[in-house]
Image (spheres, helix red, strand yellow):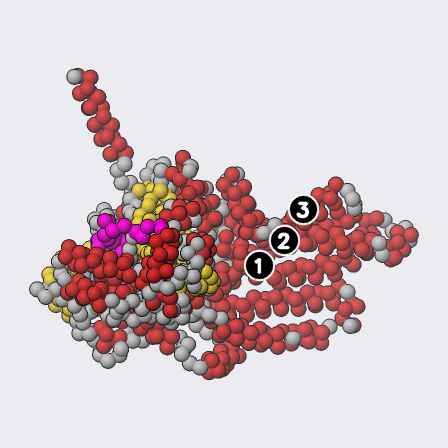
Amino acid sequence: MLKRLSLAAMLSLGVASAALAEGERYGGTLVFTAPYGSSFATLDIQASPNTQEEFITQAIHRALYSWDSIDNKPVLELATSADVSDDGTTYTYHLRQNAVFHNGKPLTADDIIYSYKRIASPKNAFPGASFVANIKGAEDFIAGKAEDISGLKKIDDHTLEITFTGPINPGFPLMQNTTAIYPSNIEDESTFAKNPVGLGPFVFREHVPGSQVVVEKFDKYYEEGKPYLDRVNIVLMAEDAARDVAFRNKEIDVSVLGPTQYQAYQGEDALKDHLLEVAEVYTRNIGFNPAFEPFKDKRVRQAINHAINAPLIIERLVKNKAYPASGWLPISSPAFDKDKAPYDYNPEKAKALLAEAGYADGFEFEVTASPNESWGVPIVEAILPMLKKVNITVKPKPVESSALGDAVTSNNFQAFIWSNLSGPDPLNAMRCYYSKTQQSACNYTSYSNPEFDKLYEAAQQERDPAKQNDLLRQANNIVQDDAPVWFFNYNKAVMAYQPWVHGLVPNANELAVQPYEEIWIDDTAPASRK
Amino acid sequence: MLRFALRRNLQIVPTVIVVALLIFVIFSVVPGSFAASLFADGKRAADPQMMARLTQELGLDKPLMERFVTYVTDLARFDLGTSFRTRQPVIDLINDRMWASLQLAIAAMVFAVLVGVPLGFLAALRPGSVLDTVTMIGAVSGLSMPQFWLGLLMMYVFALQLNWLPSFGYGDGSLQNLILPAVTLGVTPLALLARTTRAGVLDVLNADFIRTAHSKGMSEAKVVRWHVARNALVLIVTTVGLQFGSLIGQAVVIEKLFAWPGIGSLLVDSVAIRDIPVVQGTILVIVLWFLIINTAVDLIYAAIDPRIKQE
């Protein structure tokens, strides 16, 4: 008994000391990587729709809402609370009293109004305009028909009333990096591009074009005790192979992994325990154009879904860095249907469906594809022999990524392969199958089904999140059955990190984007980081 | 000499005009657009309103002829335009990157000349020797090795295994960061220089005037210095010039690999997203650089070898 007790005591002591040893440590430098290109387009992030600039935004800026990666939902960031009107369209935000910009200006309602007007200004073609457009009167302002956005009303310095066009969850649009809040007292707006000023935990220090951005701790950041780090170097590293060497050489603290590296890292003892994985919010698919005769028939589209062995491609080509798709909404979506099975691999059934549709002898079609290794030409080449078995001939039509976007949005394709946003907001994701959504917006497959529309419209009006998700789940299942696309997979993002780095979170929106203020490094870090 | 220099310099102007025309035409017909590139990674849904506004703001909705006239008139005033992506003047973007590119090209060339020329020389003076064989095997491997792979190999050996040098980046612009990319970039011109130097020197060594010099009783050292070196120089200068001119273009791969902030990586990024003003500006700068070096080489020729000037 005594022995057992002492063992328990020892264990609890051990746990206690481990907890202490894991205590957050202040100071040091984090060397973070921005892997999506070899430059930052601009430091004026309101002007940039690119993921690449989000690495800077996270350090320097804050938006009205932010994404909680643990609870997987948007939460209030610059306000401590919000009162919602009965009809769910008007929000009264009580702004943080202690939020200060890097230039010393305290945050007030004016800054938010100024920022949203700048984002929606008809003079600027800014990417955040579509998010601000959810505010009443914003459409008129964007079109240049109004001086102000009528839905924005300042009550006092720290109280702001926003009226939205409908009962939406404003957290999703207004947590976007492109809706970050800037100070309203900067005379020359062109300075934002070179000398950003925000409310974030780190202050801009230096930008070496094509090389890195350096930020340093902001002493007046509103969240007490944060950030832990003194400095973050955000270095540009677009080449996978080079990033691999730099990571192994401990020159960088994190690295985003592609399929091949993922497989390699899993097999190495020194690396395999420090991999962060998350199901991201993208659905990889081949979209069928219903204007192409054979794709008019649902049975043909279903047959293709049955004829391709998606799990095999995921295992062999994508090296398990993906989850088979069972519908449009991904695993990380709150409206994901975990009971819905993906199309099974069944060439016989595919043949039968094709015969029923009058295509027993098959047909030929072209897939417009970019060179991307996970959702481009290599995948089309992999499905080629599988579809051949059911007499369908596939021809890849290789194009560059920017040409793929053009071809799809101008409806100039028979089929295309792409990775598309399918979260985190399920309502916004399912918008892409609503018949009133323009083909060029995101209804790329010109999908139209009255049954779906009814469910979607009901979901739009539903204010209870559980009921809304239920409606969207049903809508999602209709899409799955109609098969306007070949459901390939949901992306699994993988990030490798050095053992001394703590506080990283599984961000389903974009794993590579991390909350720097939560990150700290322990004593085992090399001298260059301390 | 002055007239010769002037004539060579004037030839740059029509060349630049033709190149500018070509770039404009090519990028007007290739598929893909800047607006579409903004959602090409599929991380956001296409936004037709924003695309339309953007197209209008960038003037891409205007007829091709009108755009061409604007482009040419701006160019005549040395205005390279404004980047679609960064909304900053193209000249500023190039300016930010040019120094790093020059640094890399110059360092690579210095390395290639300092190592390649003496090796080629020594190999030619002792043909068939061990040094000759080793140099020529090295030169062939250097020429045939893909730069990307060589760069990775260098990283692996000097950064990861030996831990002597950083594997990537510009750092604070120190020599340490420059060594790996410069050496990688310098290997191809080095190999070429070693080979041409050897061939050039061997050629001269077999010439009649060398036999005459020897028969006059000149010492071996004097023959090499006064006759061989001077005559082989023309070929070496040509190779150096051609290589140096094309280095900035070749550096694209190296810059991407080593995250080196030169204009090569700027060009690649801009082509991918169809940031046409930047593409046009960068290519023009690279072409101009090539032409200037070429002209300089011609002038140096004339100085070394008076026969060229008379032609």
Quadrant of residue A162 within the rendered picture: bottom left
Q: Report the chain holding disc 3.
A: B
Residue under the point 27% across and 60% down? A479
Looking at the rendered structure, the secondary structure element under dot 2 is helix
Query: Which residue type does callout 1 highlight?
Result: Gln
Q: Are marks 3 and 1 on the same chain?
A: yes
* Mark 2 residue type: Thr
Tell me if residue B72 comes above or below residue A296 in the rendering.
Answer: below
- Residue placed under numbered mark 3 in the picture: B138
Kindly indicate whether the residue at mark 1 contacts the one at mark 2 (C-beta within 8 angstroms).
yes
Magenta stretch, residue numbers: A329-346
Q: Is residue B267 left or right of residue B1?
A: left
Q: Position of residue A209 (x, y in %)?
A: 44, 59
Prevailing secondary structure of the magenta residues = loop
The residue that label 1 is drawn on is B250
Magenta-drawn stretch contains B13:
no
